[in-house]
Image: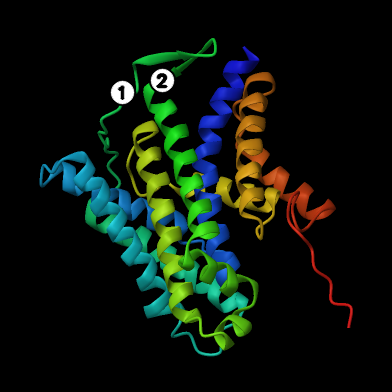
């Protein structure tokens, strides 16, 4: 039984991990938690739905088109809105992302309404497979595998490519990176695009599990934020670990204590972690000595 509960937590943690990873990437590049991440993912998922339902395109074409749209949406947020902010500070930029979140939420509600829709993907939600003595649906297994594959891809990008090295250099010291010839503004914009793509994948995986509507990513965004706080916003590996920890704790809490209060676990974790270890379990807290 406990193994099945852990597996359920890993499925939820996979979604949280993608959202947390996307938020962490933008935070490391701009020091701003992008709270529009969830609505950007939701809107990109609607784009995939329109391609599938209205234009009858194959799933993989719609999937690729949705990711392209997500990347352009991330670029638009940074180039057209964030970069043009006058005298920006962390609070102003945070409010900008919240404003963009409200804008996308309202636009989706106006365009598609609050009707709940079903995003059909070529993976069954009812058929199950047995893995190490555990029963898991094909959809949940695909969710875990896609999330892990995407996280490995991000690691390879940051570790072994010139773009990844430029992103890391910009994240560590933007001024020094600029002095060494790295186009830091362009790199930050690309980082926003990449994080938007990661969020879009989370949205497309989330929609078949629940339903497609303007509210679908509100809870995953909050849980992803909680996972990032738990793991440490400045540690990509930390936010992923924090997401899986949160998913498993939620699953165990819901079964052994109460499903009604399962959602409060994330917020309780935020309070506890911020009180005892503000930098997160795997994050590093820097103090100025001179």
Residue that mark 2 sits on? 137
State the residue in front, 130 or 40. 130
> x, y percentage for residue 149?
45, 41
Mark number displayed over residue 246: none
Residue 113 visible to the viewer: no
- Is 138 in front, or is 218? 138
Q: In this rendering, would 121 be left or right of 247?
A: left
Where does residue 245 sit, x and y in percent of width and height?
Answer: 66, 36
Q: Is residue 118 above or below residue 221?
A: above
Residue at position x 39%, y 58% from top?
A: 40
Q: Position of residue 88 (x, y in %)?
A: 56, 84
Contact (CB < 8 A) between labels 1 and 2? Answer: yes
Residue at 31% in and 23% down? 124
Q: Is residue 241 above or below residue 112?
A: above
Residue designated by label 1 = 124
Q: Secondary structure at mark 1?
A: loop
């Amino acid at each position: 039984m406990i193994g099945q509960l852990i597996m359920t937590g890993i499925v939820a943690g996979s979604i949280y991990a993608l959202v947390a990873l996307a938020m962490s990437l933008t935070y490391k590049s701009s020091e701003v938690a992008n709270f529009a991440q969830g609505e950007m993912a939701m809107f990109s998922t609607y784009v995939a739905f329109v391609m599938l339902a209205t234009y009858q395109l194959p799933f993989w074409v719609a999937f690729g088109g949705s990711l392209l749209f997500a990347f352009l949406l991330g670029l638009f947020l940074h180039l057209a809105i964030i970069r043009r902010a006058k005298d920006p500070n962390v609070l102003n930029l945070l409010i900008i992302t919240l404003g963009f979140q409200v804008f996308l939420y309202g636009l989706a509600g106006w365009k598609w309404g609050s009707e709940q829709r079903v995003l059909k993907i070529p993976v069954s939600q009812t058929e199950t497979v047995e893995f190490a003595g555990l029963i898991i649906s094909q959809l949940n297994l695909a969710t875990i595998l896609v999330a892990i594959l995407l996280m490995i891809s991000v690691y390879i990008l940051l570790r072994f490519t010139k773009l990844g090295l430029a992103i890391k250099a910009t994240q560590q010291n933007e001024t020094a990176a600029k002095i060494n010839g790295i186009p830091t503004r362009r790199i930050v914009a690309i980082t926003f695009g990449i994080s938007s793509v990661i969020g879009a994948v989370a949205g497309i995986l989330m929609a078949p599990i629940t339903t497609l509507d303007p509210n679908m990513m509100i809870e995953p965004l909050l849980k992803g934020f909680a996972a990032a706080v738990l793991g440490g916003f400045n540690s990509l590996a930390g936010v992923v670990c924090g997401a899986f920890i949160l998913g498993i704790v939620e699953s165990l809490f819901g079964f052994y204590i109460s499903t009604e209060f399962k959602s409060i676990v994330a917020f309780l974790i935020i309070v506890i972690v911020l009180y005892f270890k503000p930098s997160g379990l795997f994050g590093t807290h820097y103090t100025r000595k001179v």
